[in-house]
Image: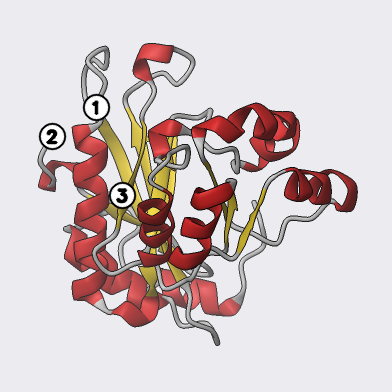
Amino acid sequence: MPKRGKRYKENMKKFDKLNLYDPKEALGIVIQTGNAKFDETVEVHVRLGVDSRHADQQVRGALVLPHGTGKTKKVLVFAKGDKAKEAEDAGADYVGAEDMIEKIQKENWFDFDVVVATPDMMGLVGRLGRILGPKGLMPNPKSGTVTFEVEKAVKEIKAGKVEYRLDKTNIIHVPIGKVSFGEEKLEENFRALLNAIIKAKPAAAKGQYLRSIVVASTMGPGVRVNPAKLVG
């Protein structure tokens, strides 16, 4: 067990860690306990009743949160010609082709949060699979990052688009904003995310789909949400 600090222990006394709370109430506790000296990020952790080892039980997608995440992401776009100009005009931070691939390979450069690529560039971008893949940065059609609609993709990412996907333990981890957002905005982002995850339920999933839901700030304790309070 990691050693917990005094502030963390004091925050743990503010709620019942075994209780299952309504989403709004849980987020209120997260705001109350997210009292570090910086504006903490609020994350949602959802354990699903699926098996990520099976292709027909994968849960993955993306959505634009109603109030964004509170963080502006740096976007790298692999495109050429008119699509490269479209990316620049849409506000992409970096745009290129072979030059960017070489920069990543030779300089170990990762000054970006999301990678978008036009389909015709994926042959080139595929060379970076072993580098970008483990970091979760490889463009993917399911998350809308392999597309000819470059302008739309960049603007959505800048507006607060988040990707959700199962990890090896069948849990989805997604940031839904900052403590400073307040209860109302965080709850709207929370419900938008959970609705997307519920809609993405695989046909092969059996039994209870939403096994457990925990919300927490960067430095704060996890607060359990009652899955029965959510549709699905």
Q: Quadrant of residue 134?
A: top right
Q: Which badge, 2 or 1, comes first in the chain's sequence? A: 1
In the image, 208: left or right of 151?
left
Asked whether the viewer can see residue 202, the reply is yes
Q: Which badge, 1 or 3, comes first in the chain's sequence? A: 3
Image location (x, y in percent) of residue 229: 11, 48
CA separation, marks 1 and 3?
Answer: 15 Å
- The answer to which of 73 and 86 lies nearer the viewer is 86
CA separation, marks 2 and 1?
Answer: 9 Å
Image location (x, y in percent) of residue 62: 35, 44
Q: Secondary structure at mark 2?
A: loop
- The answer to which of 199 and 85 lies nearer the viewer is 85
The amino acid type of the residue labelled 3 equals Leu
In the image, 17: left or right of 79?
left
Judging by the rendered image, the residue that carries numbered circle 3 is 63
Q: Residue at 25% x, 61% y: name it.
A: 189
Picture layout, residue 232 above or below residue 99 = above
The amino acid type of the residue labelled 1 equals Lys
- Mark 3 touching mark 2, by CB under 8 A? no
In the image, 224: left or right of 39?
left
Front: mark 3 or 2: 3
Crowdedness near tag 1: few (<14), some (14–19) or many (≥20) residues, C-alpha within 10 Å = many
Crowdedness near tag 2: few (<14), some (14–19) or many (≥20) residues, C-alpha within 10 Å = some
In the image, 195: left or right of 52?
left
Q: Residue at 21% x, 36% y: name it.
A: 198
The amino acid type of the residue labelled 2 equals Gly
Q: Residue at 73% x, 35% y: name it.
A: 128
Q: Which mark is residue 201?
A: 1
Picture layout, residue 219 above or below residue 197 = below
Q: Which mark is residue 232?
A: 2
- Mark 2 touching mark 1, by CB under 8 A? yes
Front: mark 2 or 1: 1
